[in-house]
Image: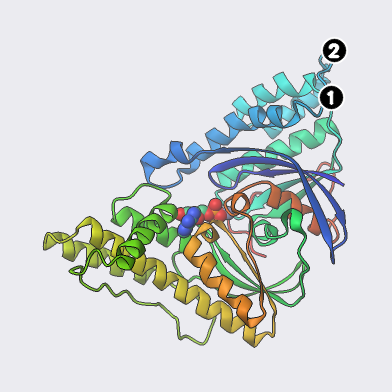
Amino acid sequence: MKILGIETSCDETALSLIEASGDLRQPKFKVVDTALYSQIEAHRPFGGVFPSLAKREHSQNLIPLLTSLLEDKTKAKKTPQVLEEETTQTLTEIFSREPELLEHFLKYIPTREKPDLDFIAVTSGPGLEPALWVGINFARALSLIWQIPVLPVNHMEGHMVSVLSEKSPQIHFPAISLLISGGHTEIILIKNWGNYTILGSTKDDAVGEAFDKVARILEMPYPGGPEISRLANLARKNEFFSNSPEVPEIKLPRPMISSKDYHFSFSGLKTAVLYLVKKLTAENELTEEIKQRIALEFEEAVTEVLFTKTSRALKEFGARTCIIGGGVIANKHIRETFAKLKQEEINVLVPEVDLTTDNATMIAMAGFLKSFRVKPEMELEILANGNLKF
Ligand code: KG4
Ligand code: ZN
């Protein structure tokens, strides 16, 4: 089965063409091709993702990405297809808020043969609604022109299934999933694909958000996760060679680490960093080395909380598979810490590095698994839902 995945929930514009086979017990995936444009540079001056800019960037980039994706897979038509009045009218309605995308679409799509596809999987939430709408409208327009059905997909289910990739690991249910991204922090009990119970989530900031905010406090650029991780690794190196004996010990809290539930809270941790940095700045003691020590202690505090709670959930539910997804699992220290669960015969699955942050392959894969529960449909009304839940 051939599936086109479309992802525009945040600041990556992504398309992916996959071939899926097998069944829910043993799904198999082959990535035919991907096209991705990261808007990070555009958002960096704002210190975070700016929704209306994300929407504009998606509108500008979808057609160029599709062009490169289809270039060697479909033929150019000898004479461009002439669209019926009614079709053009419907496309104009679909893209009423993306005139630029409509223009690109009308220029390019009628000149290309339709690709060999079974359905289109598109992210419908959670995420930034203006950004989500661009992908949804694009999917609906392609569906209309190519007469191919569409299936809306939950972005977080995408992160969850990103561990499958082409390796198709054996998954024994129940499994516990830890989803850690810029907008979410959740521990989920998976009884089967499609059968999810959220055991706990964050009461305030998401982990990735905390990384981003702490980076900003330390005057590091957006996105903060990779920056904090880089600083923390420098501190580890210094510690190893004991290059900085006079750096005072820095201690940060491990919020909710002993609470009986599976909820998280990271805003207090961020505030603790803020006060510490203010104090050190006032005392003129915020050196590069101390910044690195703060990053290290922050990364360790976050990792300990995530690890402790996830381990407890694995035990409580007798799960032997731990699935981790979301941009924050790009973090090396978190990956290495969770790899220790293998000693307890837990099968720890993390995505390959290019599938950790937002991408469309995970959306196409989640679409395939969902298609066993819900049939993709033609002329589907899909609503963007910024707060979509499982
Ligand atoms: O999943 P994702 O690409 O987008 C959302 O769905 O939110 O996650 C982005 C988040 C950002 O907050 C970013 O700072 C964080 O993932 N991130 C990291 C690392 N790389 C990206 N956090 C910690 N360590 C990293 N190496
Ligand atoms: Zn994401």
Q: Nearer the viewer, residue 232 or 224?
A: 232
Q: Residues within 10 Å of mark 2 (few under 14, many from 20)?
A: few
Q: Nearer the viewer, residue 89 or 181?
A: 181
In the shown orientation, is residue 342 left or right of residue 48? right
Q: Is residue 295 above or below residue 305?
A: above
Q: Residues within 10 Å of mark 1 (few under 14, many from 20)?
A: some
The residue lying furthest to the left in this view is: 283
Q: Position of residue 275 (x, y in %)?
A: 23, 67
* Image coloring type: rainbow
On residue 78, which mark appears?
2
Callout 1, which amino acid?
Glu
Residue that badge 1 annotates: 113
Asked whether residue 382 is in view, the answer is: no
Q: Nearer the viewer, residue 322 or 127?
A: 322
Q: Is residue 114 above or below residue 311?
A: above
Q: Position of residue 64 (x, y in %)?
A: 64, 27
In the shown orientation, is residue 51 left or right of residue 287? right
1 or 2: tag closer to the N-terminus: 2
Residue that appears at 44% across and 59% down:
209
- At mark 2, the secondary structure is loop
Q: Position of residue 295 (x, y in %)?
A: 34, 62
Callout 2, which amino acid?
Lys
- At mark 1, the secondary structure is loop
Residue 80 falls in which quadrant of the image?
Answer: top right
Residue 249 falls in which quadrant of the image?
Answer: bottom left
Residue that appears at 59% across and 47% down:
9
Give me the C-alpha separation between circle 1 and circle 2: 10 Å
Q: Position of residue 52 (x, y in %)?
A: 49, 39
Queried on whether the Cβ of the residue with tag 2 lies below 8 angstroms from ligand 2, the answer reads no
Q: Nearer the viewer, residue 382 or 320?
A: 320
Queried on whether the Cβ of the residue with tag 1 lies below 8 angstroms from ligand 2, the answer reads no
